[in-house]
Amino acid sequence: MQRKFMGRKALAVGVVFGLSGLLAACSSGTTSSETSAAPAATEAAASAAPAATEAAASEAPAAAGTCINDVFGAGGPEAGQGVTIPAGMLLAVTGQGSFFGDVMSKGALLAADQIREAGGMDYQITIGDHQSGDVPTAITETKRLISQDGIEVLQTSYGAPSEAIIPIFQEAGVLTFNGGGSSPAQLNQDLLYMNRMVYAEDPAPGALAWIHQTYPDATKLALIGTMENGVGTFKETAPAAWKALTGGEIVAAEQHDVGATDFKALAAKIKAANPDAIMTFSFGDDLGYQVKALREAGITVPIMMDEFTSQAAKIGGSAYDGVNFGVDFYSTANPNPWNQCFVAAYQAKYGEDPEYYGSNYYEQVFIVWELVKRVIAAGGDPNDAAQLQEALLADPTFKSVYGGDASTVGMVALDKVDHSISKPMGVFEVQGGVPTLITEIHKIKNGDDPMTALGPVQ
C-alpha cells in the first residue's frame, strides 16, 4: 500500500514480535529523541527483556488450530495463508498501567498464533509503548510504527493517547481498533473502530438505573473519576441520568491522577459529603486502592464501578466484597464454542485465565483475519487498509467470544456510522474476588429514560 511519509523518522529501537508468543509486557520499542519520557521507558524495557525472553521460553505453545478451524473454516490461500500483515500495538508496556499492556498483548499474540496455525494470515506484531497514557510518547511511537515498521493495522489503547494519534493514522491510512480506552471523541472517525462499549458512557445509565431500582431511597450520589477516561460521563451523562431517575443531586465530584495509590484524602471528602451511593469511573489498580480506602474510611454505601480486573480485586481484598460494576464484561465461563477454544489456548500458553481486555484485543485480530479473507475472496489486496475497511463497512458483523451459547458462537456488530460496537452489558456483584451477573443492561440514546436501559436489548 502506498502511504504518505510521516515527517522525519523517530529514532527508535523496535522489538518485532514473531508469532511464537513472546510476552509483550516486558519488551517493546520505546526510545525516541522526540520525547523526554522515552529514555526511562527504554531503560525499563531493556532491563526487563531478559526476563521476558526467559518467561516466553517457559510458556507452553499455543493450542493447535483445530478448534479455530471448527469455528472459522479451513485454512489455505483463501484464508490468507501466505499473506503477511504488518501490525502494531500501542500499549501501556511500562508505567502504572502495565497490567493492561500485558493482558492486551497476550490476547493479540495468542490470536496471531492460532490464526497462523489454522492456515490463515501471518499477523506480525510490533509493540509501541505509550508509557501508560503519555500523549507525546504515544505520538512518537505511532509515527515510528508507521514510518519504520510499515504497519497496516494498529491496535491502540487508552483514551487520550488514542485521540491524539487520530490524525496520524488517518493520514497514513492505517486501520485502527481500540478495545480498551474507548471514548466519545474516538467515535465517527475514519479508520478507527471500537470493539468495546464506550467507556463509562454506554453502561452508566443502566448502572444508575439499577442503583435506583435496588436502593429507591438513594438521592445523593458521589462521583469519582480521572481526566483520562469517562470525563463526559463524569461531568454530564451521570449527573443528568441521576437527576432524571431520582430527582436527587450530585453531592461530591472528585477527580484524581491516574495511577494514584493513596485515596485517604479523597475518601475523607466523600465521607463528608454523606452520599447514598458512589459511582466511580476510575480504572486499573487505582480502583483496588480506592475501594479499600473508601471502606476503611467507614463508608458503607453501594459502590458502582465501571471496570473489573482481577489485579485490582486482589489489591482491594475483602473491601471488594459487595461492590458492583456495570460494563460489557467478559466471562471465561461462557460456553460459546469459540470462547472455550480461546480460554483453553490462553491457559495452555500463559498458565492463567484470560480477562476482559485480553479478550477484546484477541477478537480484534480475528476481525482483521475475517477482513483479509473477504478482500481475498473479492480479488483485492489484503495489504491495503482501505480495502479492509471497505470489507468491514460492507458487512460489520463478526464472530465473538461474547454472547452465544454452548452450541452457538456469539456475534457482534460494529456501527457503520459512529464505529462503535454492540456487546452484551450487565451489572455485576463481586464476592470473594469473583464477579456474578445480577442483571443485563443495554445502551440507550441520549435523552432516553435511564430506566429503559435495564434488561437486554429488546
Image (spheres, grey):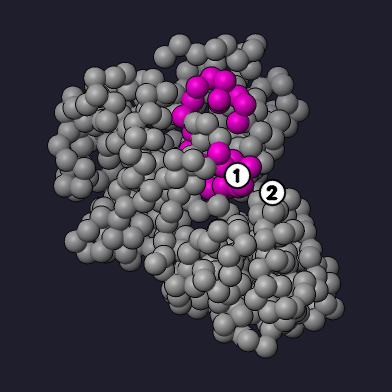
Q: Is residue 429 above or below residue 288?
A: below
Q: How many marks?
A: 2
Cα distance in 3D space between marks 1 and 2: 8 Å
- Residue 334 visible somewhere in the drawing: yes
Q: Quadrant of residue 296?
A: bottom right
204 and 81: which one is in front?
Answer: 204
Up-down: is 276 above or below 125? below
Which residue sits at x=66%, y=33%? Answer: 164
Q: Secondary structure at mark 1?
A: loop
Pointers 1 and 2 in contact (C-beta within 8 Å): yes
Q: Is residue 176 magenta?
A: yes
Does 36 appear in magenta? no
Percent across and percent down for residue 144 are: 58, 21
Residue of label 1? 158
Q: Which quadrant does the C terminus fall into?
A: bottom left
At label 1, which amino acid type do we have?
Tyr
* Residue 48 visible from this viewpoint: no
The dot on residue 228 is 2
**Residue located 15% across and 37% down the image:** 74
Direction bottom: furthest residue: 217
* Above or below, comparing residue 244 to residue 30 in the picture: below
Please report the bounds of the magenta region as a residue range: 166-188
Quadrant of the image for the N terminus?
Answer: top left
Q: Position of residue 388 (x, y in %)?
A: 37, 28
**Nearer to me, 20 or 271:** 271
